[in-house]
Image: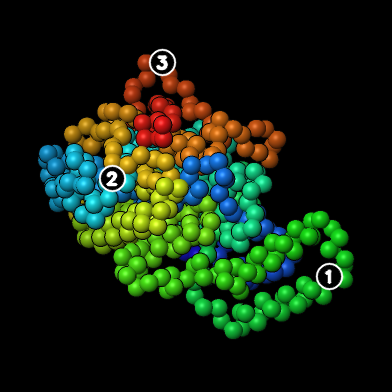
Amino acid sequence: MPMPAHDPLCTHHDHAADAAYRRAFDLVTRRDFLRLGTLTIGGLALAPYLRATPAPTARAKAVIQVFLFGGPSHTDTFDPKPAAGADITGPWRKAIGTNIDGIQINELLPLIAQHADKYTILRGLTHRTNGHETGVYMMQTGTDPSSGLVYPSAGAVIAYKMEETGLLKNRSLPAYMTVPVALGRFSEPGFLGPRARTFVPGNLGDPLKDNERQRLKNREQLLAQLDAFGHAENDLFEEADHFRDQAKEMVLGETREAFDISKEPDPIRKLYGDTEFGRSCLQARRLVERGVAYITVNMRGWDTHRDQADRYKKLMPDLDRGLSALLADLAQRGLLDTTILTCGGEFGRTPKFMTDPPWNGGRNHYGAAFSWLVAGGGFKGGQTLGATDPRGERVTERPIAPWDLTASIYQLTGIDPAGTLPHPSGIPAPVVPPPPAAKPGAPRPGKISAGGTSDIPIASAGILKEIMPT
């Protein structure tokens, strides 16, 4: 699957690593699912995915992560600075009120503003990089790259831990899924290996063609003939038979309907909007209803170094409609109490709005200060946590490190952040590794060098107890 093109004016060194990342990130798509023959012994590779159910002791039973790839501007979304000069606000100088007194967001998000009682805005996020790959890695894994281990994503950890409990049974859908596409900016299984890779359904929502259906039936018949090996007496192959049957159900049975949003009533489809992002959000809700534990919804296009005003005319209405619909729909169905919903990117954008050529109105990468939205699953709503200065350039209250957010999500999903994960070398790897120790007298976090990184360790305040259940 081709990667979306980068802005040619983005010259950060991490873009040169794209080819290596794509080679390391082998997507499991619907085409591969059919071509590799999941109904054969080769389908064993997908077996761990096909038994997802939430841990019974968890407050949150599922997570939907809306990832705004490229880095949305915090000042143009959840942390507006209307009193700053035009060099900061750009063309959007107005902040609008929400349904919670005292909380304002950018004027470009009027629908999301109506649901502020359901979410908390994290305005104190900060990390040490302006590079896409490292920023994505930190926000998706909740770990610092200096840990020395290549960590799996939070989705992979949650799926693995659910499997470890022995409770991932009687489900025909993968525990960890990504829609509409995976972005390939990091290898999400990390040291957990290929078994922990996300499943990308691709166009499983489309009708199955007659020739595809017949090919799968032919493979099933061939497998039945191979029973002459007597594998039914082998525990390994008995388990393979179980997962083969579940895979068959996902492709040929009623479970396939989980991906088909055409089954939704017209008013619901209109609520989300007929866009790639809106359809993906609706599919995520359907997957949560069917027991999928972790869904990443990737929204592309946020790497706005130039012509941001024109690009936001498309991006912002799509985000506003799709995300507000997801919040409202989850709440109306009683799912928000047990489903964590997060939204953010790998970093923010520079507060200064660049009007000179070649930018023509754009913002660069900015990891010193940015915002995320969190809702549901036990997170309190109607609040803000952390703050930036009047120009949005640095965090002034309650710095939040990526691992603070991830550890909080783990705790709400019944995972001990102080627990361990298996590593191929045999060493016990912490679920959330400790952050690098701060140097005596080091400046506070929030300053990033022109080269894109800082050697100043990020202060960590730990679990986001201010918005966690009491």
Q: Judge whether residue 348 can be spotted in this image.
A: no
Callout 1 crowding tier (Cα within 10 Å): few <14, some 14–19, many ≥20: few
x%, y% of residue 17?
Answer: 48, 50
Q: In the drawing, does residue 147 fall left or right of residue 464?
A: right
Element assignment for label 1: helix
Q: Of tags 3 and 2, which is closer to the observer? A: 2
Q: In the drawing, does residue 404 fall left or right of residue 151?
A: left
First along the sequence among labels 1 and 3: 1
First along the sequence among labels 3 and 2: 2
First along the sequence among labels 1 and 2: 2
Q: Residue 440 — which label?
A: 3
Name the image quarter holding residue 313: bottom left
**Viewer-proximal residue among 421 and 10:** 421
**Viewer-proximal residue among 405 and 347:** 405
Q: Amino acid at mark 1?
A: Asp
x%, y% of residue 125?
Answer: 35, 36
Q: Residue at x 13, y 47 (%)?
A: 93
Say whether marks 3 and 2 touch (CB < 8 Å).
Answer: no
